[in-house]
Amino acid sequence: EEFYKEVAKLIENSKENLKGFLIDLTFLKDKQKSNFKKLASIFKTFHRDFLLSEFNPNDANSLNNAFYKELLYILGLCESKQNSKLIIAKSEESKEEQGTFYTAINSKLKEENFETILKLLILWLNRILFLKLIESNLVRFNDDKNLKFLNFKKIPDFDKLSELFFEVLAKEKSTRKKSEFAYLPYLNSSLFEKQSIENTLEISSLSNDLKL
């Protein structure tokens, strides 16, 4: 008890702003009305990934294996063994310059650089996977499929995707231009800030005629 009193004094005297959120769980007392399967998203707020900001959308261990392999295929990458270690390498399709994201990026560079291409792929993939998480939660919480935005109707090309990254999600609502994405939240995250690697190539520079 004494400990909490001392902590209270520190908080009261602190000039720092503390952000928090409140979850009202009193409705759980009525077990007959509560559908616990629908509460999975709320329960996730108590997971260390959320509390400690440790969520990593690039963690293959958390992905379905079939989805992971399909993702590598589309990106133009593959897993390869080197000195008994698994590494990510350029796929045969990319070597043959078939329709992969690796090939699409490489075609826009002055010279091929695997590390640069890999960094861009990881950066853009992280953003899109994070947005998929946002989209699914928006639809689930509001029970409204019209809130989906990761589709060709709302994002027909890479220019629109770039606009979503930097002109919508990276800006507070009061500073945005009028947009069909006005309902999307401001993501105060460095993930949606332009990275130095994007001085080499921006996603808006990719060909909209890309066929995978």
Image (spheres, rainbow, N blue to C red):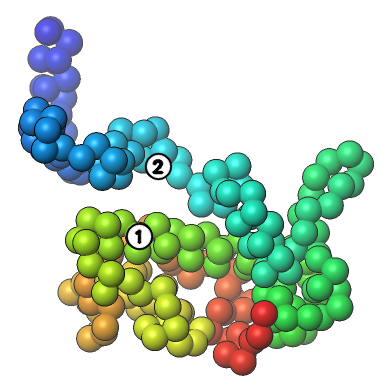
Q: Which residue is mark 1?
A: 136
Whether residue 106 is visible: no
The answer for how far apart the CA atoms under marks 2 and 1 are is 19 Å
Q: Position of residue 43 (x, y in %)?
A: 29, 36
Q: Against 54, is 158 above or below?
A: below
Residue 58, given in percent of the width and then of the height, sits at 57, 52
For the point 42% across and 78% down, which residue is it?
Answer: 151
Q: x, y (%) of residue 141?
A: 22, 56
Q: Secondary structure at mark 1?
A: helix
Q: Residue type at mark 1: give it.
A: Ser
Q: Residue at x 79, y 49 (%)?
A: 87
Q: Quadrant of the C terminus?
A: bottom right
Instruction: Specify the farthest residue to the front.
Output: 32
Can you say whether 33 is above or below 154 in the image?
Answer: above
Q: Element at badge 2?
A: loop
Q: Is residue 94 visible?
A: yes
Residue located at (11% from left, 22% from top): 8
**Residue occupying the far bottom of the picture:** 209
In the picture of the structure, the residue carrying the numbered disc 2 is 53
**Vertical position of residue 145 compared to residue 137: above or below:** below
Q: Residue furthest top?
A: 2
Mark sitting earlier along the chain (2/1): 2
Q: Quadrant of residue 108?
A: bottom right
Question: Is 109 situated left or right of 2 in this image?
Answer: right
Q: Nearer the viewer, residue 201 or 91?
A: 91
